[in-house]
Amino acid sequence: MNDNNLIIQNNLKEAYSDIFRSEVLSTLSSLAHFNGEIKEFTASRMQRRAARQQQKKRIAFLDPESYIPRANIRVQDARDGQFEGAVIPADLQRQWIQGTGPAAKPDAPVESSIRNVAYALLSGADGWMFDGEDALGQTGTMSLDNQRNLKLAKAKQDGLFANFTNMQDYGFREYRLDESNMQDVYYRPQDIQQGSLDLFADHIKPGRTSDDLLAQVMLDWGLLLSLKIVQEEVVGKKVFKVAGNSLFACFDSGIDEAFAKEIATEKPLRIVFRDASFQNDTAKENVKQLLKQLSPDTEMKVI
């Protein structure tokens, strides 16, 4: 199909009429004269590649005294930063995201294909620039699907974010550098005199919250603080679940066999309690043995 100086193959103009709008066709028509230069450049580039391969030559650097095509700048001046750059337009002096991946996946439903667009728009940036390709290049109508997904995501009605408002609360975590949550006796018990042990009945320093303890445990086990953390109630106890079943943590008191039986059904890879969570050493050992029996792969730690 011919539109002014454009040729749109097959029935794509009709199939993607939401993309090939009149203003788009007008813009493409204005840019069409660059197509000849693009083809000449591509052909020259392919010839240089073929010659290098035939002659087994390495890729060479440009002659420092030559000039950059379409610019009155010597190669050496460009390398030395000896040139004046254009002023950045005001509309580009904003918080942009540069997307290196596609806004569409080949032969994928919209729900899956549009995911990259959703992540970018939810970032809070003013805009998103993407290359429109993937590692394998364009396939089929992928470039048109890129544009369609962008339109669907931003649609005011029936779009991906039709019910989205900036008032939604996605939560916020703040971490500050501090000293350890643990008393010195936890790290150097040999330095504490026996007569002073009653002063350290709890290994945890006063005023430390469950969130404080969880952060330290995650760092001790090499887990990123950015991992997803879910709080759930199990047998009346608050349990932190980190990255699925990667780590469970419960710092409430009264941990017993009933709790251990329930938590073992989820097969956590690691679980941590505070020493004061148990009524006595016997209760602690019972829970440990029960977890070993019901969930052998679970590593239990007490702080």
Image (cartoon, rainbow, N blue to C red):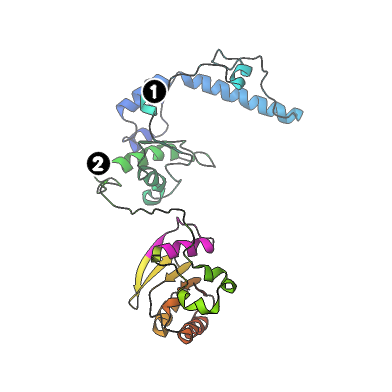
Q: Which residue is mark 1?
A: 89
Amino acid type for the residue under numbered disc 1? Pro
Residue drawn at x 57%, y 25% is 42
Q: Which residue is mark 2?
A: 156
Between 283 and 109, the one lying in front of the other is 283
Q: Secondary structure at mark 2?
A: loop
Residue drawn at x 51%, y 60% is 219
* Residue 158 sits above or below residue 251 on the image: above
The N terminus, quarter of image: top left
Comparing marks 2 and 1, which lies closer to the viewer?
Answer: 1
Between 174 and 296, the one lying in front of the other is 174
Where residue 300 appears, as percent x and y from the top left, is: 51, 75
Between 271 and 38, the one lying in front of the other is 271
Residue 44 is drawn in which quadrant?
A: top right
Let me know if residue 141 appears in the view: no
Residue drawn at x 23%, y 43% is 157
State the extent of the magenta-drawn residues as a range.
212-230
